[in-house]
Structures are given as structure tokens and as C-alpha cells.
Image (spheres, rainbow, N blue to C red):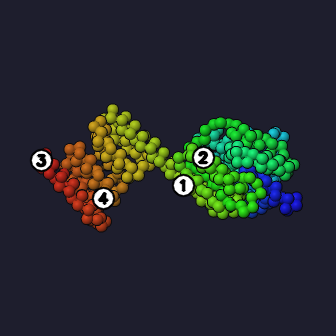
Amino acid sequence: MHTKKFVRTSLLLLALGMGSLLCNAQALPADAPKPGLRIGGYALDMQTAGSGPYTVIFESGFAGDLSVWRKVAPALSKSAKVVVYSRAGVGKSDARPEPRTLEQSGAELEQMVKAAELKPPFILVGHSYGGFLVRQFAAHHPAEVAGMVFVDASAEGMDAALKKIDATRFAADQKAFEGFTPAAFKAEYKLVQQIFDAGALPQGVPLPDVPTVVLTSAKVYEKPEFLLHTPSGMAAWRLLHEQFFRQFSNGSHVVTSNSGHYIQLDEPELVIRAVEQVIASASAQAQRKARKLAREGVLDAVDQAALLVPGDAESMVSARLKASQLGEADINAMAYELLRQPKRAQFAPVLMKFNVETHPDSANAYDSYGEALLAMKQPKLAKTQFQRALSLGRSQGKDARALAGYEENMKKAELADSLAQ
């Protein structure tokens, strides 16, 4: 294709929020694994690299092959498993006979995930039309998706917004888009256009509320060739992205005027940071969920242990504490909560005792254990713990305030012990 015509074709397609085959470079380093797949007898060009707790799957825009991620995927492969691929009929992937509907491409993505034995949790990254596919997969597999990144993603309401701005110019642009679409993609173009005509995606299933970053191009075009690139068109584009992002409770909407539609090529660092942000947020959420489940498990053990004899009860709770892998601070906080609950208070010293056995060099653990024993009217045993806290605190150079607290607790235990005699 002649260079000028090729660039014009690219611009026309991306004006609909679609991309094109702009690059032939590989997305990952030359030494990266290139397993490839055959699904249903058809070759699928797929590359994977890296490892980590998350699998990052990249979805390219309309007619875009895996190479559009070449500036992003290698950097992310240092801390996660990254997967780039070209959809059927694009790049080196075999064409398939089924109509290129969103549902069909979504089904083929699911086939790839299964055939390549890709393991969740997934971070999905979609550029342009690829954003629709990310939404399709996430809506049908919410439990497997830990986060999403939308890179100047298509907005199904864009055509309606542009018609309101200038229906005549919009119609002219549409006619030009169809004329400049490469022959190999005309049939798919018409099917994709049906989404914009309807102003809605077919599945109509809510997206999971996971950490999400939306990246939006707000580039200023001095001589906009298309309605989308006029100030009013770009304002509508930005507004649609803002409205889309509002459904998520965790994430950010990043707007850049330094990039065109291909943010991953113009400012790859924005996409890299977005994925890293989503991974960090997803990890924090997973840790909070794990702590919550661990706490619930310990409390269940406490309630069950209340029916057992003391020795067996302590063994049960201690075993559950060990399995929970909760840290000293979490266990300490739980113990103080139990002290405020009459039916569970007897188990607060069990949790504190576990802490001192697990963290024998923690002055705070001994002090807390002493407070629990004192609350359960065992001042003699409490004095032993406070003495240990003071000894450790002094040797470790604890500040005066902490030492004063240990000493005050010791005085309380000594007074309680003297009154008990």
C-alpha cells in the first residue's frame, strides 16, 4: 500500500476508535518463548514471556497485530507473565471462516486461554476495539479477572455523540471509513459497526468492580481531518471515557494530550505504569481478602473451641492461628477485640501467648500478653510478661514513652497481685 494512503487508512480507522497494522516488529524480545497455538486446526500467533502471580493479556485494536505492544510487554514481563497475540486473520494468525463478530472473537480468546493453559488471576489490557473484547471476557469470567486497563478504548456511544455534533460531517466520515477499510477487513468492519449503530455491546452483563485504569488521548489536532478530531469531537470522546470509568470504585482515569490513539507507542510508560498500578491495587485487595478470611477462620475456631476442655481448646485455636499466617499486629488486634467480648474474652490470652511464642523478641507482644492476663484476673502471670517486656524494651532501646507504658502496667499487676493475696 502506498505510504500516504496507508497512513490515511490508519487515521480513518482509528477515528472510529480502531487501529490498523502499523508495525511488523516483534512485540517481545527475540529470545522470548514463541509457543504458538493451533486451535481447531488454525494457527494462532501468540507469544508469552515472564512469570509472576498475574497473567497480563493484551488485546490489540481493530486489525492490529501483537506488535503494537512491543514497547510495553517486555517491561512488564519482568514481574508478570505477559501474553500478546494476533486475532484470527490478523498478522501471522490463520483466518477462520466464522464471521468476525465480537462474540466470536471473544469465544476465540477463551479458547486461547484454555489451550495455552493460562492461569488467573488475569489483568486484561485492551486498546481501541480490544477494549470491547476485554469487557466481553471480564463480564463472562469476573472471578478470574483481577484488573483491567483500557488504552484509548472504543466507546459504543461515540457515533451517537458525533451525530449530535454534526450529522452531515459524521455521515461523510462514515462513508470515507468504509471506502478506505482494507478489503481483508471490510466484512469485520461492518460487523463491528453494528455495535456503534446499536450504541451498546451485545452481552449486556455488568463488569466486575476490579482495579481499573482508563487511558484517554486528548491530543489537539491543528487541522482535524475528521469530526472526531475536532475540539467538540475530542471533548465527547473524553466525556464518554469519564462516564465509563465511573462504574469502578478503584483506579484512575488518565488523560494525555501528548499521545494520539496509539498511547502504547507514543507514551508506553503510561501503559506500563497503568498495568503496574492495577497489579499493585489487585495485590492489596487480595491481601485484604486473605486477611479477612484468615480472621474469620480464627474466630470460627474460637467459637468451636468454647465447647472443648481448656487444653484442647488452646491447641485448636493455636493450630488455626498458625495456619492463618496472620502477622503479629493482626493477631494482637484480634486479641484486644476478644477482650471486649464476654463470650470470647477467655481466648484473648491464647492469641497473645501465640504471639510471644512466635515473636519471642517482641517487647510489645509480651506487654500485650500481660494485659490480657491481667484482664482475666491472673496478675501473677501478668507480672512475668511485663517484666519480660521491660527487659527486652531496655535492651532494644525502646523510647521512653513505651517503657513508661510497660512500667505502668507492671505497677497495675503488682497492685492487683497484692490485693489478691
Q: Is residue 314 left or right of residue 269?
A: left
Instruction: Using the image, tell me which numbered label, if any, was put on residue 243.
Output: 2
Instruction: Say whether disc 1 or disc 3 marks the residue closer to the N-terminus.
Output: 1
Residue at image location 60% in from the left, 59% down from the top = 273
For badge 4, the amino acid type reads: Ala
Instruction: Using the image, tell me which numbered label, if any, was put on residue 363.
Output: 4
Instruction: Say whether disc 2 or disc 1 marks the residue closer to the N-terminus.
Output: 2
Q: Are marks 2 and 3 in contact (CB under 8 Å)?
A: no
For badge 1, the amino acid type reads: Ala
Distance of label 2 from label 3 (alpha carbons):
68 Å
Q: Mark 1 or mark 3: which is in front?
A: 1
- Crowdedness near tag 3: few (<14), some (14–19) or many (≥20) residues, C-alpha within 10 Å: few
- Crowdedness near tag 4: few (<14), some (14–19) or many (≥20) residues, C-alpha within 10 Å: many
Instruction: Using the image, tell me which numbered label, if any, was put on residue 280.
Output: 1
Q: Mark 1 or mark 4: which is in front?
A: 1
In the rendered image, the vertical position of residue 63 relative to residue 70, given as above or below: above
